[in-house]
Image (cartoon, helix red, strand yellow):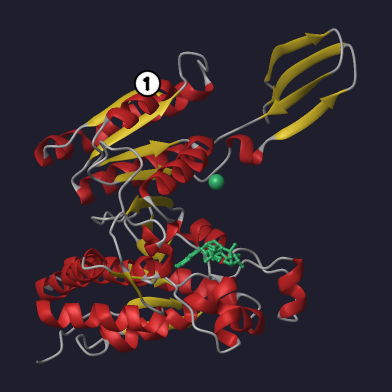
Amino acid sequence: MSKIEMKTPLVEMDGDEMTRILWQMIKDELLYPFIDLKTEYYDLGLEHRNETNDQVTIDSAEATKKYGVAVKCATITPNAARMEEYDLKEMWKSPNGTIRAILDGTVFRAPIIVKGIEPCVKNWKKPITIARHAYGDVYKSVEIDVPGPGTAELVFTGEDGTVLKETIHNFKGQGVLQGQHNLDDSIESFAKACFAYALDQKQDLWFATKDTISKKYDHTFKDIFQEIYEADYKDAFEKAGITYFYTLIDDAVARVMKSEGGYIWACKNYDGDVMSDMISSAFGSLAMMTSVLVSPTGVYEYEAAHGTVQRHYYKHLKGEETSTNSVATIFAWSGALRKRGELDKLPELMEFADKLEQACIKTIEDGKMTKDLALITSMSNPTVLNSRDFIVEIRHTLEGML
Ligand code: NAP
Ligand code: MG
């Protein structure tokens, strides 16, 4: 069988620990045998980030802007323990944070649905994708412990001398205070990324805030979404047969629980933080989630939603067997290959991406899976495979489909 040709390289961002081991196995077993794989390789493993003073992370993000599609392995975000373990020059920032800042992106996360790994919510038949705004609100807030009686005011002093003032509260005793902000630019980028992704996925877009209570703050989010929708996306949505739906956050939560899924749910920063954990645990596991960063200019970076699976890596280093689930990392590759195929008009590459995903799902549905899934499956007597054998089994399934 001749290998599938590629035109433009993918930006390949290698990573750390167990996921770095899986990364190589995936390329060897599932990609090289079938594709004439073209990538521009960036090693985001912590050692190399340290050697390059983290320049490699910046370079990889710039390359993503240039080529349009990247695939990223999970990476270590350094903390005090990692400083020592890797003898780091500095506590380098989270690569995901650096890349997100350069691409100005929004992260979309969706569960991978498999028969036998049933969501806790019975009526969820299709994935629910969460789009989380990643700037501001409580994550960039300032807080004061109010020591006793006094007046709290909200004051804005413009560069031109304009002063806007509101009394927050006349305290009679002790209490607490918090100041939050967001930026129109950031909300606009978020809105555009959501509308563009909904069109790309041909799925309805839901958005919700508490604008009845927060008449300026949350209302600004609602208004910006509505203005951008009317101006730039309404026609395209109508043509694609999808809808934009705004409601109150409490109404949204109630509707989500009753829905059958199959839409994108745009969330403000805090809502997205909380709801994405609820959605992923209700659907099964982080190892069965896809994650893609989409910039407002339409640049895509695909990754797994989980980390580097450190505990498994240490077992691997000791020569012990591991049973680490590679599905999310494989789906990062298939997502990137499909997008590359779409941009370069390579239907064969897109078809391969579809088959690779189907092969993962079929392998699990045939009862062959890693330990994390065996623990939660409703199937009786699943076959538990080690990290490599699971990937090899997916290869057998894939070969049967090609
Ligand atoms: P983690 O890598 O997500 O793993 C936490 C636990 O979840 C594992 O010990 C394992 O449970 C289970 N797990 C996660 N992924 C799995 C998979 N594919 N297959 C089977 N089980 C899986 O989180 P962590 O151990 O807290 O973090 C390790 C490193 O990852 C940290 O240095 C952190 O900075 C980094 N991180 C990176 C990213 C990213 O690059 N996107 C995201 C999060 C964390 P059991 O041990 O019970 O089997
Ligand atoms: Mg969280």
Q: Position of residue 123 (x, y in %)?
A: 25, 36
Q: Quick one: quadrant of the N terminus?
A: bottom left
Q: Quadrant of residue 341?
A: bottom left
Q: Identify which residue is drawn at 18% across, 46% down.
A: 202
Q: Is 53 on the left-hand or right-hand side of 386?
A: right
Ligand 1 in which quarter: bottom right
Q: Position of residue 156 (x, y in %)?
A: 69, 24
Q: Quadrant of residue 382?
A: bottom left
Q: Quick one: quadrant of the C terminus?
A: bottom left
Q: Identify which residue is drawn at 49% across, 24% down.
A: 218
- On screen, residue 248 above or below 328: above
Q: Is 125 on the left-hand or right-hand side of 400?
A: right
Q: Position of residue 122 (x, y in %)?
A: 28, 38
Residue 259 appears in the rendering: yes
**Amino acid at dot 1:** Asp
Q: Identify which residue is drawn at 38% across, 62% down.
A: 373
- On screen, residue 69 above or below 319: above
Identify the residue position indicated by label 1 in the image: 251
- For label 1, the SS is helix
